[in-house]
Image (tube, helix red, strand yellow):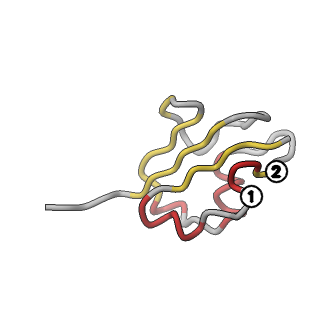
Amino acid sequence: MNITLLCYATFAAKRPESSDNFPITAGETVRDVLRRVGIPLDEVKIVFVNGRSSDLEVQLAGGDRVGVFPAVGGG
């Protein structure tokens, strides 16, 4: 199974080369995937799965689109 993994802002540097076709195994969660690519979980502010707000415990399925955002500051 494969997903699309979209890493935004400071997480873009952690985006794997295979992000458009990122392999997952049955039962893997958003948390599992983020650990695999080295995104610090304590820095994750927003997660979307298939365009809907989600959390780290959601189990993923083939074809899912996952977007992760850090907290973003500005002034």
Front-most of residues 13 and 59: 13
User: Which is nearer the eye, 33 or 1?
Assistant: 1
- Badge 2 crowding class, 10 Å Cα cut-off, few under 14, some 14 to 19, many 20 or more, is some
As measured in the structure, the alpha-carbon distance from the residue carrying label 1 to the one carrying label 2 is: 8 Å
Q: Where does the image place residue 70, in percent across and percent down from the top left? A: 42, 58
Mark 1 Cα within 10 Å, few/some/many (few <14, many 20+)? Answer: few
Query: Where is mark 1, residue-wise?
Result: 18
Q: Which residue is mark 2?
A: 23
Quarter holding residue 16: bottom right
Q: Are marks 1 and 2 in contact (CB under 8 Å)?
A: yes
Task: Classify the position of the N terminus by image quarter.
Answer: top right
Amino acid bearing label 2: Pro
- Pick the quarter of the image with the C terminus: bottom left
Q: Is residue 45 above or below residue 35?
A: above
Point 51% across, 29% down: residue = 52
- As helix, strand or loop, the secondary structure at mark 2 comes to strand
The answer to whether 45 appears left or right of 66 in the picture is left
